[in-house]
Image (cartoon, rainbow, N blue to C red):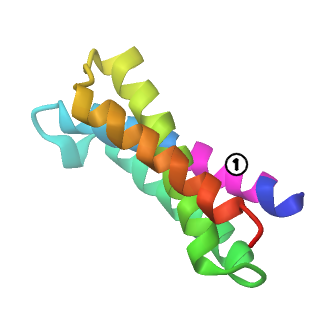
Amino acid sequence: MRSYLILVGIVAFTILGDYALKSAAIKTAPFTTSWFAAGTVLYAVTALGWVFLMQTHNLAQIAVLYSSATILGLTAVGVAFFGETLSLRQIVGLGAALFAVVIMETEA
């Protein structure tokens, strides 16, 4: 259970970091903004969580869970906050990401 909470924290900090970096990227001088600094710090915090997870878990399993959750979260942020739209191909890709989670979590 603790592992899932750490993973949720990593995903949340990644999404917040990406939001900050996207906000910096749309500025004229992105590397000099507070958005860029915030994104960098948030990404650094995720490294701490990764170290804890890697001590006890298979990298493939946490990678699939992390990637899928991050893909869904970032898609939601892009649509909700940056006015991005999804193509049918992207929607199918999201479905494939979710299917990968099901496959990885199913006991053999």
Residue farthest right in this picture = 1
Query: Which quarter of the figure has residue 95?
Result: top left
Q: Nearer the viewer, residue 79 or 47?
A: 79
Residue 11 visible, this angle: yes
Would residue 83 be found to the left or right of residue 3 on screen? left
Report the side of 36 relative to 1 (left or right).
left
| Residue for point 46% across, 49% down | 97
Which region of the structure is painted magenta?
Answer: 5-14
Residue 65 lies in the magenta-colored region: no
Q: Residues within 10 Å of mark 1 (few under 14, many from 20)?
A: some
Which residue in the rendered view is the most extreme toward the left?
Answer: 28
Residue 62, given in percent of the width and then of the height, sits at 63, 67
Residue, x 69% and y 56% (percent of image)?
7
Question: Residue 79: x and y, percent?
Answer: 35, 19
Residues 80 and 102: in front is 102
Q: Is residue 28 left or right of residue 54?
A: left
Rendered view: 8 above or below 50: above
Dominant SS type (magenta): helix
Identified by mark 1, the residue type is Val
Residue found at the far bottom of this picture? 55
Q: Residue at x 66, y 78 (%)?
A: 51
Seen in the picture, residue 58 relative to 1 is either above or below; the reply is: below
Can residue 14 be seen here? The reply is no
In magenta segment, residue 7: yes
Considering only vertical position in the picture, is 9 above or below 16?
below
SS class of the residue under badge 1? helix
Decide which of 39, 50 is in the foreground and name it.
50
Quadrant (top left, top right, bottom left, bottom right) of the N terminus? bottom right
Q: Position of residue 90 (x, y in %)?
A: 28, 35
Residue beneath disc 1:
8
